[in-house]
Image (spheres, rainbow, N blue to C red):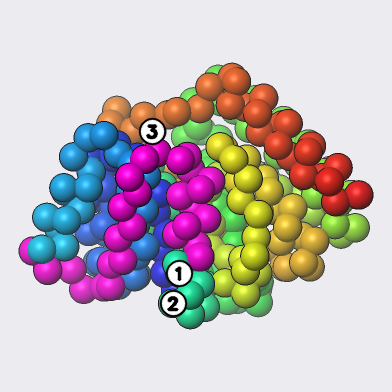
Amino acid sequence: MVAVIPAYNEEKNIISVLKDLSDINIDVVVVDDGSTDKTKTIINEFLEKNEFKNKIFPIFKEKNEGKSKALEDGTNYAVNLNYDAIVYLDGDYQHKPSDIIPMYEKMKSENADAVFGIRKYKHIPFHRQFSNFLASVIMSITVSVFSGNFHIFRDIQCGFRIIKSEFLKNSYFGDGYSVEHLIALQLAKKNAKITEEYVTIDYHNDAISYITTKKILDVVKEVAKYVLSKH
């Protein structure tokens, strides 16, 4: 199993993520998505110290191409390394790597092909709760109709997931922030068994959200475009 981490201007957070993953001995593909701060320097300094227990594969991009492209590049790299499963978590340390262990145990115990994280609503800022609930309901219906299999998602926008690599080959990652929705659609279409597990979320002061109203509307357009293109 390997973790794929997209990182854009995460100089304050990326080391915490890498250290925690080292502590639980999870290998990492970290994708610096053209950061303009010291993220690349900090990652290289961490690698030079050679104090980690796991394997770390850095990808440094010359320009920022967005989360979806960073995840696509990281996924393709990980698949080519022949890891059996890929963990997705953000580089801003809102997701806690220690949750990977219970997530993976849930995946194994239910013989699932993917496990999606669920953020407890009491930990989600109030202004995000309604939009998250609405997106999950709409996507549950959309995925069920699209795949012909019944699915209920309680937190479709949570990017903390573990997915078997075999279901990620030749996947379409889209643009911007639609990637979680698009991957859910494709997994369901491939008849992957998807389960869910509660995860910790920490909206700390050093975590910066790049999501805007325009980007949310772009997600809707991207999902609609993908679904219509397959019918």
If you read the primary sequence from the N terminus, does the residue marked by circle 1 or circle 3 appear first? 1
In the image, farthest residue toward the front: 62
Measured in 3D between alpha carbons, the distance from the residue under mark 2 to the one under mark 1, in whole angstroms, is 5 Å
Q: Amino acid at mark 3?
A: Tyr
Question: Could you say which disc has been placed on residue 132 in the image?
Answer: none
What residue sits right under mark 2 in the picture?
81
What residue sits right under mark 3 in the picture?
203
Please report contact status of discs 3 and 2: CB closer than 8 Å, yes or no: no
Find numbered disc 3 in the image and state the secondary structure of the residue it sits on: loop
If you read the primary sequence from the N terminus, does the residue marked by circle 3 or circle 2 appear first? 2
Please report contact status of discs 2 and 1: CB closer than 8 Å, yes or no: yes
Say which of marks 1 and 3 sits in front. Answer: 1
The image quadrant of residue 194 is bottom right
User: x and y percent of residue 134 in the render?
Assistant: 72, 30
Q: Which residues are magenta?
A: 49-76
Q: Amino acid at mark 2?
A: Leu
Find numbered disc 2 in the image and state the secondary structure of the residue it sits on: loop
User: x and y percent of residue 157 in the render?
Assistant: 60, 41
Find numbered disc 1 in the image and state the secondary structure of the residue it sits on: helix
User: x and y percent of residue 230 in the render?
Assistant: 85, 51
Q: Residue at x 47, y 34 (%)?
A: 123
The image quadrant of residue 5 is bottom left
Residue 95 can be seen in this image:
no
Q: Is residue 78 left or right of residue 221?
A: left
Q: Amino acid at mark 1?
A: Ala
Give yes or no for residue 72 being in the magenta stretch: yes
Crowd band around label 1 with a 10 angstrom C-alpha radius: few (<14), some (14–19), many (20+): many
User: x and y percent of residue 212 in the render?
Assistant: 53, 22
In the image, farthest residue toward the left: 49
What residue sits right under mark 1 in the picture?
78
Give yes or no for residue 141 being in the magenta stretch: no
Which is nearer the eye, 127 or 3? 3
